[in-house]
Amino acid sequence: MGHREDLLEGAKRCLLEKGYARTTARDIVAASGANLASIGYHYGSKDALMRQAVIASTEEWGAGLARMPAGDEEARDADPLDRFAAVWDRVLQRIATEPQFIAAQVEVLGLLPRDAGLREAIGEVLPEGGEELVAAFDGVPDTGADAETVRVVGSFYRALLTGLMVQSLLTPDRMPTGQDLATALRRVTTG
């Protein structure tokens, strides 16, 4: 790897270990083995590098969701609420086993109202996450759904995912199961 890649990897490690706001340029240099001047040369600023670290780590986590096993053919053909519950169980397992990533994501969400650069950087890539979530829940890479359906359904999954991330930090011992979420969805949709 070159200095650019080393810096990004170091920034991603710092994001997990120290958080977004507490990471300094010197922390990144120590974690990456690069020199301080290379941050400005490759990224323009420490903040630009940290924004890229947030995006890269989020994309990697999202790609992991897309690679989650959707189950066998029978599971993909199962009742949609059963599939919904099964996929959420796998997502909840990832949330439970990656608390540093979850804490970093929630921290970044709290910074968005006051950091226009961060908000703009995340806003540029956020819509793409909806497609990955829809594909993960449908069990196929291309759902065949129109763009508006993918946007709406992806937004729903993203809202649920964000809420579950926050809940995992507040009450990790009282997290719902995938079946709990399916039961709630069934109750909401049937009155």
Image: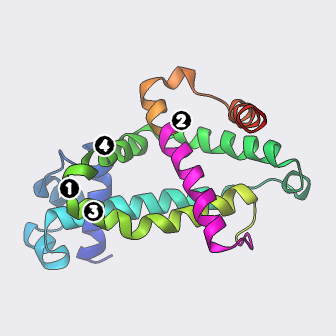
- Label 2 vs label 4: CA separation? 17 Å
On the image, the x and y values in percent for residue 46 come to 15, 63
Residue at point 31%, 62% (across, down): 53
- Residue 33 visible in this rendered orientation of the protein: no
The numbered mark, 1 or 4, whose residue comes first in the sequence reads 4
Foreground tag (1 vs 4): 1
Q: Is 37 above or below relative to 84?
A: below
Tell me if label 1 and label 4 are in contact, CB under 8 Å: no
Tell me if label 2 and label 1 are in contact, CB under 8 Å: no
The numbered mark, 2 or 4, whose residue comes first in the sequence reads 2
- Label 2 vs label 3: CA separation? 24 Å
Tell me if label 2 and label 3 are in contact, CB under 8 Å: no
Foreground tag (2 vs 1): 1
Residue beneath disc 2: 96
Residue beneath disc 3: 51
Foreground tag (3 vs 1): 1
Residue beneath disc 1: 115
Q: Which mark is residue 107?
A: 4
Secondary structure character of the magenta stretch overall: helix
On the image, the x and y values in percent for residue 62 come to 53, 59
Helix, strand or loop for disc 4:
helix
Residue at point 65%, 60% (across, down): 134
Tell whether position 30 is magenta.
no
